[in-house]
Image: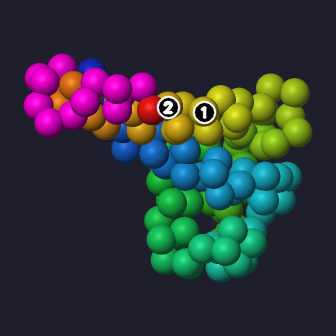
Amino acid sequence: MNAGVYELLMAPFRIQVVITAVRLGLFRILGDRGLPAEEIAGLCHTVVGPTQALLEACVELGLVTFRHGLYGNTHFSRLYLVEGSPRYVGNFIKLIHQESKAWDNLYEIVSGKEVDAMEFSK
């Protein structure tokens, strides 16, 4: 498959990983330290297995490191995804999450099927 097509098709999954990690406060919890998945799940009040899968996805995206059994923020994440950083974009990510819900009905709105156009603006 063409790399550009693959990137396009994977974009929704990648943004959901970022949105979920931001909403859970994952990058804030990691801060400047490394933690095991079990401790991260406890601090996020989440289930260990799925939390570890989320952490691994963050590793694949270059947002989190994994060394010696500990997950930690990358330089990029410390700059842009840790609350309190001057360059923090987490609030914008949360806004994108809220606004993107309206786009779930785009097909129905454009095709005129079963959705009132006013639903799109909610």
Query: For numbered disc 2, what is the local secondary structure?
Result: helix
Decide: few, some or many residues near mark 1? Use Cα within 10 Å; few <14, some 14-19, many ≥20. Answer: few
Q: Residue 60, how many percent across, how many down?
A: 48, 48
Q: Residue 91, how many percent across, how many down?
A: 70, 35
Label 2 with label 1: CB-CB less than 8 Å: yes
Residue 47 against residue 89 in the figure, above or below: below
Quarter of the image with the N terminus in it: top left
Rendered image: mark on residue 99:
2
Name the residue nearer the viewer: 62 or 112: 112
Q: Amino acid at mark 2?
A: Glu
Name the residue nearer the viewer: 103 or 81: 103
Query: What segment carries the magenta color?
Result: 110-121
Q: Residue 74, how many percent across, how many down?
A: 70, 43
Residue 8 against residue 16 in the figure, above or below: above
Q: CA distance from mark 2 to mark 1?
A: 6 Å
Q: How many marks?
A: 2
Q: Is residue 59 visible?
A: no
Query: For numbered disc 1, what is the local secondary structure?
Result: helix
Residue sitting at x 60%, y 74%: 46
Rendered image: mark on residue 95:
1
Name the residue nearer the viewer: 118 or 41: 118
Quarter of the image with the C terminus in it: top left
